Image (cartoon, grey):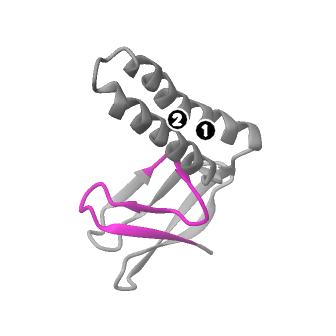
Amino acid sequence: MENAKPILLLVRDDRRRPGQWSYQKLTRLEKFKLMSLRSGTFLGLSIFFILVPILHFILVPGALILAIYFGVKALQYQNRLLELTGQCPSCEKPTHEADILFGEQLEFKCPNCSCHLKVLPQ
């Protein structure tokens, strides 16, 4: 893993294990593409839902609201995790994560024990 930076994986009861990660900041263009993809999906569905008799009165506004919600949510992501390796403090098994979008702080579940892990940069 090139350009890896040291981290601590933290569990709720303050147990910690060292690890490494690499990530990149999203550019404005990448954020715009992500927002367009996520909101465009629901905009396309809303156009399709116009053809559904009677239910289009509910489905079209619902899809438009979801398009706005997921578009705004996509703009909140600031970073993309390229790779994370470490040992889960709870089950003490190795964990490997990649390609996760996150905002200010990265939190994820251990794939082995489903324990909630928080990443603390060192």
Q: Are marks 1 and 2 in contact (CB under 8 Å)?
A: yes
Figure quadrant of residue 31: top right
Q: Is residue 103 magenta?
A: yes
Bin the neighbour count of mark 2 within 10 Å (Cα to Cα): few under 14, some 14-19, many 20 and up.
many
Q: Position of residue 38 (x, y in %)?
A: 52, 35
| Residue beneath the point at 55% across and 28% down | 40
Q: Position of residue 9 (x, y in %)?
A: 46, 71
Whether residue 99 appears in this view of the structure is no
The reply to whether residue 121 is visible in this rendering is: yes
The residue indicated by pointer 2 is: 38
Report the residue at 25% width, 57% height from top: 112
Position of residue 87 measured from the top left corner of the image (x, y, whole percent): 39, 65
53 versus 8 height, above or below: above
Quarter occupied by residue 66: top left
Left or right for 106, reference 96:
right
| Left or right of residue 100, residue 56 in this image | left
- Return the residue at label 1: 35
Compared to residue 62, the image places residue 51 above or below, namely: above
Circle 1: element type = helix
- Residue type beneath disc 2: Arg
Q: Is residue 53 above or below residue 106?
A: above
Q: Which residues are magenta?
A: 97-120
Q: Residue at x 75, y 43 (%)?
A: 28
Q: Residue at x 51, y 28 (%)?
A: 43
Q: Label 1 is placed on what type of residue?
A: Met
Which quarter of the rendered picture does the C terminus lie within?
bottom right
Q: How many marks can you see?
A: 2
Badge 1 crowding class, 10 Å Cα cut-off, few under 14, some 14 to 19, many 20 or more, is many
Say whether residue 63 is magenta: no
